[in-house]
Image (cartoon, rainbow, N blue to C red):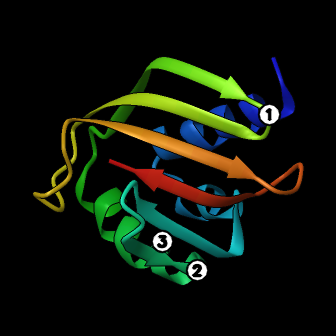
């Protein structure tokens, strides 16, 4: 398993555990989360925190399963199946997530559809 796959898997485990501090530790301070059309969904760790803090607090059965993964260079594209989320209603039950790392220990850009 590559270093980036290990990084993303650890991030997914923090998500499953609803461990906000650990989950946020995987992102670069200036991370930008966009959809695949380039629309900015969240900026910076504080933007991610504002979205995920209520999600983690209100979703005791939150989980994600990586159903498929493509890895090339510093990019990982995961097909994620989400369950147990109670907030917000616009999050789909399945989504495609691509993540890029710039350093060995932080995600610098994430896209979701």
Q: State the image coordinates of residue 32 (x, y, percent, origin top left).
A: 56, 71
Q: Are marks 1 and 2 in contact (CB under 8 Å)?
A: no
Q: Count the marks: how many? A: 3
Q: x, y percentage for residue 24?
A: 61, 64
Mark 3 lies on residue: 48
Within-10-Å neighbours for mark 1: few <14, some 14–19, many 20+? few
Q: In this view, which residue lies farthest toward the front? A: 37
Judging by the rendered image, the residue that carries numbered circle 2 is: 44
Q: Are marks 3 and 2 in contact (CB under 8 Å)?
A: yes
Disc 3 and disc 1: Cα gap in Å? 25 Å
> Residue at 58% across / 80% down in the picture?
44
Q: Residue at x 18, y 60 (%)?
A: 87
Q: Nearer the viewer, mark 3 or mark 1?
A: 1
Under circle 1, the secondary element is loop
Marks 3 and 1, the one that precedes in the sequence: 3
Q: Is residue 85 left or right of residue 2?
A: left
Depicted 49 relative to depicted 7: above or below: below
The answer to which of marks 1 and 2 sits earlier in the sequence is: 2
Between residues 104 and 61, which one lies in front from this camera angle?
104
**Is 50 placed left or right of 6 in the picture?**
left
Label 1 vs label 2: CA separation? Answer: 24 Å
Which residue is rendered at x = 30% and y = 69% of the image? 54
Q: Which mark is residue 73?
A: 1
* The furthest residue to the right: 104
Relative to 66, residue 21 above or below: below
Examine the rendered structure and indicate whether residue 33 appears above or below residue 78: below
111 relative to 106 in the view: left or right: left
Residue 89 image offset from top left, x and y in percent: 10, 57
Expressed as whole percent of the image width and height from the top left, the position of residue 106 reads: 77, 57
Checking the image for residue 35, the label placed there is none
Give 100 or 21, whichever is nearer the viewer.
100
């Amino acid at each position: 398993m590559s270093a980036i796959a290990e990084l993303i898997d650890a991030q997914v485990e923090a998500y499953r555990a609803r461990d906000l501090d650990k989950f946020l530790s995987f992102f670069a301070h200036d991370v930008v989360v966009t959809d695949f059309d380039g629309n900015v969904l969240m900026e910076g760790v504080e933007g991610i925190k504002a979205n995920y803090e209520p999600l983690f607090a209100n979703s005791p059965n939150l989980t994600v399963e990586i159903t498929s993964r493509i890895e090339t260079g510093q990019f990982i594209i995961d097909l994620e199946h989400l369950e147990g989320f109670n907030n917000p209603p616009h999050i789909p039950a399945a989504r495609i997530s691509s993540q890029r790392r710039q350093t060995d220990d932080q995600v610098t850009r994430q896209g979701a559809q």
